[in-house]
Amino acid sequence: MSIRGPEALASLDEAMRDIRREEDEISKRLARSAERISKIRETEAELFRQLAQLRLDPAIQAELDGRISQAEVKARDMMKAHAKDLSQSEKDLAAIDAGLVNSTESRGAALKELDTKQAELKALAARIGASIAKDPGFAAKRKEATELADIAAQSMRKTEQAEADREQKGRPYRDDGLFMYLWERGYGTSGYRANNLIRYLDSLVAGLVKFEKARPNFAMLNEIPLRLREHAERQIALAKQAEAEADALETEAINAAGGKPIRDALDAIQSRIAAIDAEIVAAEDKRDDTAKALASLSEGNDPAFAEALAALAAGLGREDIQTLLSEARLTRTGQDDTIVAQIDDARARIKDEDSETLEQKDRLKTLAARRRELEDIQWEFKKQRFDDPRSTFREDRLVGDLLNDFLRGGISAATYWGQWQKSQNWQAGTTDWGGGVGLPNNGRSNSGPWSGSGGGGGFNWPDSSFGGGKSKPSSGGFNWPSGNSGSRPSTGSSGGFSRPRTGGSQGSRPSNTGFKTGGGF
């Protein structure tokens, strides 16, 4: 079952909210654990006072009690300040989350407006399609654009075949170390430079590998794809120009029929969506920094707080106190045994809390990493305009099993994003009608000849009246092939996700997602 772009993005938004909720819950658990540890330390200190009263003379007892009390007072004061900072961070995070929810809802409303305007433009094009198609000037220009697009597509297919041959047939040459040695030195060309001895030795090597016969073949394998790609790119440029001219004629006709206000409205909606997206990115980055600060406070990493607890723990670990405890263990009085047992229990509870805290810290780090990866995916999703109402996805598993696999770490973010790209299509009967909608590839289908995957390319006109029922590529902005590949890069230019990051880091969910908070992925 296929899913539409807005619903797909809503599922990703819901998964993001689940991650954020679990992050908040773990931060609160860590904060409670740090508080429990500090209180257990205070209890331990009181137990040592009671033990000192039983076993030490008043002078030593007073000295020990003073040291413990001083550490306790410092820890208690730091705990109050720490709790205040923790509470403020929690409020800041809640405010950012509320703002993100509002921004997401505003964006969803804008997408619905976009859907309505696109439907209006589609209906208008359906009404005037027949008359535009009958215009001799348009028909001739559209025919020219179609023919040039076919030529360009054929040229690109030949180029890709030649590049595949270069890779396959050139491998034996590249695997021959002696041949490549001579090739890289430029042996047999005007650029070859060597003294007489090296020339003589190289000639022996050349005779051994039959270099004189093999070099032209290898040179041809490398040269043909380059020349073919240059030719293909020239054909693509001609096809682009013809398409732009045909699209200009269409735009004039649609504007004359009342389409310009609709396209202007679409432009305004897209600008509003872009502004919301910028706000979301800024809020997400701010939230990331705030979440890090909250996690640090929750873990008891505030320097003053940590110092106070360390001082208390050090006071309780002094040699004279440990001696007191050891001697108490050797006696068989009931009071000593009770206090010692309570001290042992307090220390066991602290150990348990520390162990659980380590697990929760690791979980929090995993959640933070997954959240940032999901932010990257959402950014690319919006950048490619996959959330457009006309965008569809064949695989509903993308918001079910595959989403769970990604969240649990079973597949990487790049792999998961690649699955979205493979599954994505544009609804038939949609186009830019001269621009203004801002659809990725400006109305072309992902299966078009310029995407590197073959196929007919472009969107069908609403009533198949334009261009005799054939698909019609739109103008401008399409990802025409360049460089060494005809395919669109899946992520940023550096090979990673392209979401900008500042600071220090970088609808209802369907019932079959299986994604749960509390360690459910």
Image: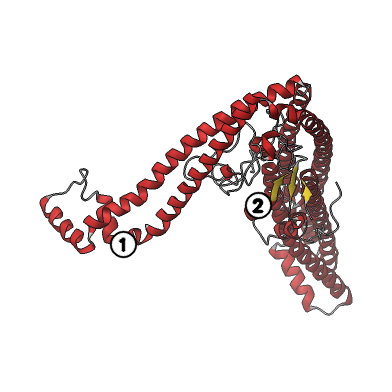
Image quadrant containing the N terminus: bottom right
In the image as oriented, which residue stretches furthest toward the bottom? Answer: 332
- Residue drawn at point x = 68 percent, y = 60 percent: 409
Q: Position of residue 169 (x, y in %)?
A: 38, 59
| Left or right: 375 in relation to 332 | left
- Of the numbered discs in the image, which one, if any, rests on residue 272? none
Front residue (pair 511, 143):
143
Closest to the camera, between mark 1 and mark 2, is 2
Q: Is residue 16 visible?
A: no
Q: Nearer the viewer, residue 39 or 266?
A: 266
Mark pair 1, 2: CA separation: 38 Å
Residue drawn at point x = 82 percent, y = 55 percent: 29
Whichever of labels 1 and 2 marks the residue nearer the N terminus, that label is: 1
Amino acid residing under circle 2 = Lys
Report which quarter residue 383 is drawn in: top right
Image position of 43 with respect to 16: above or below: below
**Left or right of 75, for residue 491:** left
Q: To which residue does mark 1 refer?
A: 176
The total number of labels drawn is 2
* Quarter occupied by residue 397: bottom right
Q: x, y percentage for residue 437? A: 72, 31
Amino acid type for the residue under numbered disc 1: Asp
The answer, for residue 331, to whether it is visible in the render is yes
- Residue that numbered label 2 is attached to: 422
Q: Residue at x 74, y 55 (%)?
A: 395
Nearer the observer, 518 or 58:
518
Q: Secondary structure at mark 2?
A: helix
